Amino acid sequence: MNIEVIKPGLLSTLQDSGRHGFQHLGVLANGAMDVVAHRIGNLLVGNGPDCATLELTLQGPHLRFRGDALIAITGADMDAAVDGLRLPLWRPISVRAGRELRFGFASAGCRAYLAVQGGFAAPLFLGSRSTYLRGALGGHQGRALVRGDTLTIDDYPVPANPRLIETGQGNKESACWPTWGVSSHQLARLSRPGVIRVLSAGQTERFSSKARSALLTQPFKLSSQADRMGYRLEGALIDPPARFEALSQAVAFGSIQVPPDGKPIVLMADRQPTGGYPCIAVVVTIDLPQLAQMRPGDGMRFALVEVNEAQQLLLARERLLAMMASSFAARVES
């Protein structure tokens, strides 16, 4: 089954869970910015966690389906509609051949994810289908979608459950959405708006107490210099360590570097493998999806937590996702 790209959207790229295990060779990890929205989208349509989804940034595409498909849209709300019929988020939806799916501008959040049962087909590069734009590698020809592209979906039988299928009644279009999906309670458990929790980094103690205090007590906002590689923050200036000299070292998704101008940079999914700027803290894994959904002008504060607390938070999230995976799998197969 194929999907035709009528309009590409602002930035639409294929992403999966990332290209891991090669950073020591200088290969970037890439992958979905909001890995939770990506994973849940795949769960809702019965895919494995490593299937590629289409990551949409701020404004989504206009697509035409050339075959029946089971889809799910997660993450930011981009007013998705099929032939004018508004679609719900965080639920599985069947779309018939010939239908057109249109996205608008994000009314909340920054990135949405389109998952399709069977997964988007793309060549594997070092075990991943994720797109690395600067290197023109992976994904769909190493780039964002453009008008006229055709996306291929691995063949997969679409469930015939009428609760999921659009139905025509007279001259009006209607749809019976499934009553199951991600609940508002579950979504609330997966987010903590406003506060980004961080861990101390190996170079934290090289910063002055004034600099460390500024990070944890002053508000920041996301500047317009923000992309998949990194987020530059505006707010209090943080003084880097005096006479700092160090060899470049490995950096992680969420590392907060402080360049000479004192404006912190949070490294994101397309970060470089190593960096030489001093690292004052690292965002905990569980708060990276929240950070990925922020857009320029959004405010944030940082709070320091201990490693044990960060680990317990991550384990709780994984237990919730495992419970959702078991529940969704039973429903998709029924």
Image (cartoon, rainbow, N blue to C red):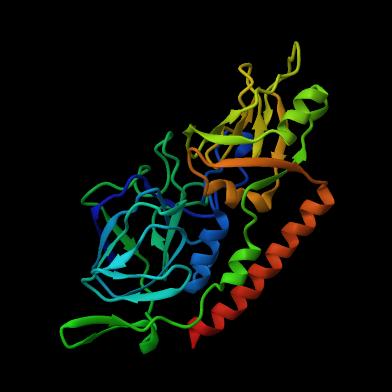
Q: Where is residue 158 in the image (x, y as percent from the top left)?
A: 37, 80
Q: Where is residue 51 in the image (x, y as percent from the top left)?
A: 48, 62
Task: Inspect this view and state whether residue 268 appears.
Answer: yes
Residue in the foreground of this view, choosing between 287 and 135 = 287
Q: Position of residue 140 (x, y in %)?
A: 35, 49
Residue located 26% across and 60% down the image: 63
Q: Where is residue 210 in the image (x, y as percent from the top left)?
A: 79, 23
Residue located 74% across and 43% down the image: 303
On screen, 54 above or below 41? above
Q: Residue 261 sits in which quadrant?
A: top right
On screen, 254 above or below 278? below
How many labels were placed on the picture?
A: 0
> Does residue 258 appear to the left or right of 211 in the view shown?
left
> Does residue 288 appear to the left or right of 1 in the view shown?
right
Q: Residue 80 sits in which quadrant?
A: bottom left
Residue in the foreground of this view, choosing between 149 and 89 = 89
Q: Which residue occupies the extreme left position in the image?
A: 171
> Does residue 204 appear to the left or right of 290 in the view shown?
right
Task: Inspect this view and state whether residue 53 appears.
Answer: no
Residue in the foreground of this view, choosing between 29 and 72 = 72
Quick one: quadrant of the N terminus?
Answer: bottom left
Residue located 52% across and 49% down the image: 293
